[in-house]
Image (cartoon, grey):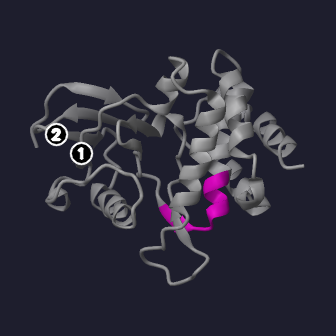
Amino acid sequence: MRTGRLIGAGRTADVYEADAGWVLRRDREGTGDAVAEGAVMEHVRAHGYPVPRVRPGTTQSARTDLVMERLSGPTMLRACLDGALTPQDAGGLLAGLLRLLHEVPAYRSTDPGVRVLHLDLHPDNVILTADGPRVIDWSNAEEGDPGLDWGTSAVILAQVAAVGGPLAGPAAVMLAALLADPSTLTPDGLAEALRRRAANPTMGPDEVAALPAAEELIRSHLG
C-alpha cells in the first residue's frame, strides 16, 4: 500500500503515516509476518490486553506490512527520560503488563501452562496513551512458558545497565522494580533468554559482550 511520511524507525522496521488514525509498520528486512503478528494482537486484545487495533483487511496485505491504530503519547522510555515517569514506576508497570499478558490463554496450544509471550517487552515498546499503556511490536511473539518472557525483559534491561552510558542507571532501577517479585522468572527461562539474546543478529558486539554481567546483575536480585 502507499505510505505517508516516515514517523518512526526501529532495528528492523519502519513506521509510516497511513490513512487517518492508522499507521503502517513495514519490516525492512523482508522477513516479517504481518498476518501472524496481527492475529496475535487481535487475540490478546479480545482478552482485554492493551494493544493497538489491527485494521481489518491487513491479512490481505503484504506479509511485511501491518496496518494498525495510530497511538498518541510518548513511549515509556521517553516518559522516563523527560521525567514524567520514574524508572521504578516504569519497572513496576512492565511487571504488571507481563502478569496481565500471561493471564491470556494460548491461541493454539491446549496446555494450561502455555501462555502468549511477547518476548520483547521493554520501555520502548510501551506507548503511554491518555487511556493507559499500549504494548506494541509483537513480531517476536510465541506461545510458551511465561518464565521466558520474564527472562527476556530482564535480560534486555540488564544489558542496558551493564553496557553503561546515560541509560545504565535508570535501566538498573527498572530491573530492580521488574524483579521485585521474581517468582515467575525461572532458571530455565533466564537461561533460554540469555541464549536467544546471544544469538540475536540485531545485537551489537558491546551488547553481546555485556551478557555475562547482565546475568550476574539479574541473579543479584533473585536472592
Packing grade of label 2 (10 A; few <14, some 14-19, many >=20) is few
Residue that badge 2 annotates: 21
x%, y% of residue 113? Answer: 61, 76
- Residue 210, compared with residue 166, is above or below; it is below
- Residue 38, compared with residue 170, is above or below; it is below
- Residue 178 or residue 196, whichever sits in front: 178
**Res. 207 visible in picture:** no
Q: Is residue 118 left or right of residue 96?
A: left
The label on residue 105 is none
> Is the N terminus in the top left, top right, bottom left or bottom right quadrant?
top left
Magenta region includes residue 45? no
Q: CA distance from mark 1 to mark 2?
A: 6 Å
**Marks 1,2: beta carbons within 8 A:** yes
Q: Residue at x 65, y 53 (%)?
A: 150
Question: Quadrant of the rendered structure where residue 2 is?
Answer: top left
x%, y% of residue 118? Answer: 50, 55
Mark 2 residue type = Gly
The disc, 1 or 2, on the residue closer to the chain's N-terminal end is 2
Q: Residue at x 62, y 46 (%)?
A: 153
The residues colored magenta run: 142-150
Q: Residue at x 62, y 67 (%)?
A: 145
- Residue 101 or residue 24, whichever sits in front: 101
Q: Residue at x 67, y 61 (%)?
A: 147
Residue that badge 1 annotates: 69
SS at mark 1 in the image: strand
x%, y% of residue 106? Answer: 47, 73
- Residue 169, compared with residue 31, is above or below; it is above
SS at mark 2 in the image: loop
